[in-house]
């Protein structure tokens, strides 16, 4: 700071930015994008980060009402959130999403690739459409969003990319060749990108949830689910908040990169 006058001008600008929401684009709060941030694990992550530290972008594809409700809850807690519709399974959807974020908020500091789907079927019965849908939504989306988020992260010498993988990407699962390939792919993708970005202040990690009590798991036949729970040493499904806490931890950890954080009640130990 050259002069006392400049110091006070700077102070005034900062005061405007943080206290009145003026020039939101220049806010010092970190901008977090949560793909599929309106439901299930994604909504728990949005709510965990929906505090005064972050501006949360809640991406949704179909669940607009859920997205509005999560935004409302964040604002009730004094946080700032935006909801943005985009189909992240398509590169055009990702591009549209980042265009909107940059126009309304600025660049993304923290990218949480959470959106995912299952299309379970034994390999014998699985069609190429079910393979492609799962690979596009769970894996190619991370390529597309990372490609769009990374240039600004490298410029700022700060960034966090957290990919929500799965225990199934580590252990495999019956009827899940597509899902398992996508989730394993995320682990390899994260390790390789971590090597490329570590010296620029950007970390890239995975979280591998076990079985968490969301719509995705509740869609399983009850007898299958009962059998799974019996095999979990913790003897219960995980809570979406367990995953959200892991996300916060990886955001705070600057010297952890290329890793997978297993949050699975002891179901699978590496
Ligand atoms: P969920 O309840 O079924 O929610 C899926 C989320 O993904 C929704 O928010 C959905 O958004 C979003 N999504 C799906 N396709 C999308 C697309 N094309 N574009 C944008 N958003 C899309 O699932 P969940 O259990 O919360 O799973 C979240 C992540 O955790 C997934 O990656 C999943 O594979 C992983 N995971 C879950 C478990 C588990 O036990 N639940 C275990 C391991 C890993 P809309 O509703 O707006 O379409």
Image: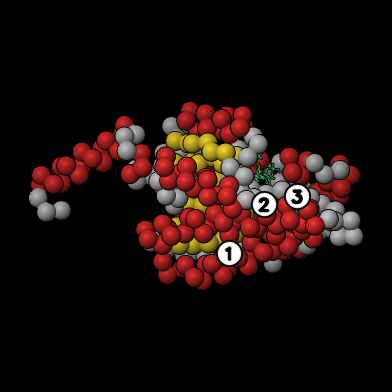
Vertical placement of residue 37 versus 185, above or below: above
**Which numbered dot is residue 118?**
3
Please state which of residues 265 and 142 is positioned toward the viewer in this rendering. Answer: 142
Question: Pointer 2: residues within 10 angstroms few (<14), some, or many (20+)?
Answer: many
Residue at the image position 77 percent from the left and 57 percent from the top:
131
Crowd class of label 3 (few under 14; some 14 to 19; many from 20; radius 10 Å): some
Mark 2 vs 1, N-terminal side: 2
- Ligand 1 lies under 8 Å from the Cβ of mark 2: yes
What residue appears at the point 42 percent right and 70 percent down from the top-left corner?
199
Can residue 84 be seen here? yes
Q: Nearer the viewer, mark 3 or mark 2?
A: 2
Residue appearing at x 43%, y 32% in the figure: 78
Q: Position of residue 144 (x, y in %)?
A: 57, 56
Q: CA distance from mark 2 to mark 1?
A: 16 Å
Report which quarter residue 64 is drawn in.
top right
Q: Nearer the viewer, mark 2 or mark 1?
A: 2
Query: Residue beneath label 1, please?
Result: 190
Q: Position of residue 117 (x, y in %)?
A: 71, 48
Q: Secondary structure at mark 1?
A: helix
Q: Quadrant of the C terminus?
A: bottom right
Q: Is mark 3 within 8 Å of ligand 1?
A: yes
Image quadrant assignment for residue 222: top right
> Observer-nearest residue: 89 or 221?
89
Would residue 150 be found to the left or right of residue 127 on screen? left
Q: Which residue is label 2 attached to?
A: 137
Task: Give the number of the disc on residue 179.
Answer: none
Q: Residue visible at 85% across and 53% down?
A: 121
């Amino acid at each position: 700071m050259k002069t006392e006058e400049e110091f006070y001008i700077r102070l005034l600008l900062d005061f405007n930015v943080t206290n009145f929401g003026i020039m939101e684009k220049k806010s010092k709060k970190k901008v977090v994008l949560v793909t599929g941030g309106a439901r299930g694990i994604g909504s728990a992550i949005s709510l965990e980060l929906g505090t005064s530290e972050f501006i949360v972008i809640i991406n949704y594809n179909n669940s607009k009402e859920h997205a509005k409700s999560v935004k409302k809850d964040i604002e009730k807690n004094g946080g700032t959130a935006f909801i943005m519709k985009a189909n992240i399974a398509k590169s055009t959807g990702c591009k549209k999403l980042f265009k909107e974020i940059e126009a309304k908020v600025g660049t993304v500091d923290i990218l949480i690739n959470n959106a995912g789907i299952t299309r379970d079927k034994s390999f014998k019965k699985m069609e190429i459409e079910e393979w492609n849908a799962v690979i596009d939504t769970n894996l190619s989306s991370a390529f597309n969003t990372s490609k769009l988020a990374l240039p600004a992260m490298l410029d700022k010498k700060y960034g966090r990319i957290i990919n929500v993988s799965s225990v199934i990407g580590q252990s495999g699962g019956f009827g899940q060749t597509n899902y398992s390939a996508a989730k394993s792919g995320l682990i390899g993708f994260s390790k390789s990108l971590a090597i490329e970005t570590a010296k620029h202040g950007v970390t890239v990690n995975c979280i591998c949830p076990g079985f968490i009590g969301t719509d995705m798991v509740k869609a399983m036949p009850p007898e299958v689910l009962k059998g799974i729970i019996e095999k979990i040493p913790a003897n219960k499904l995980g809570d979406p908040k367990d995953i959200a806490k892991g996300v916060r931890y990886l955001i705070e950890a600057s010297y952890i990169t290329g890793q997978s954080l297993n949050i699975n009640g002891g179901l699978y130990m590496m």
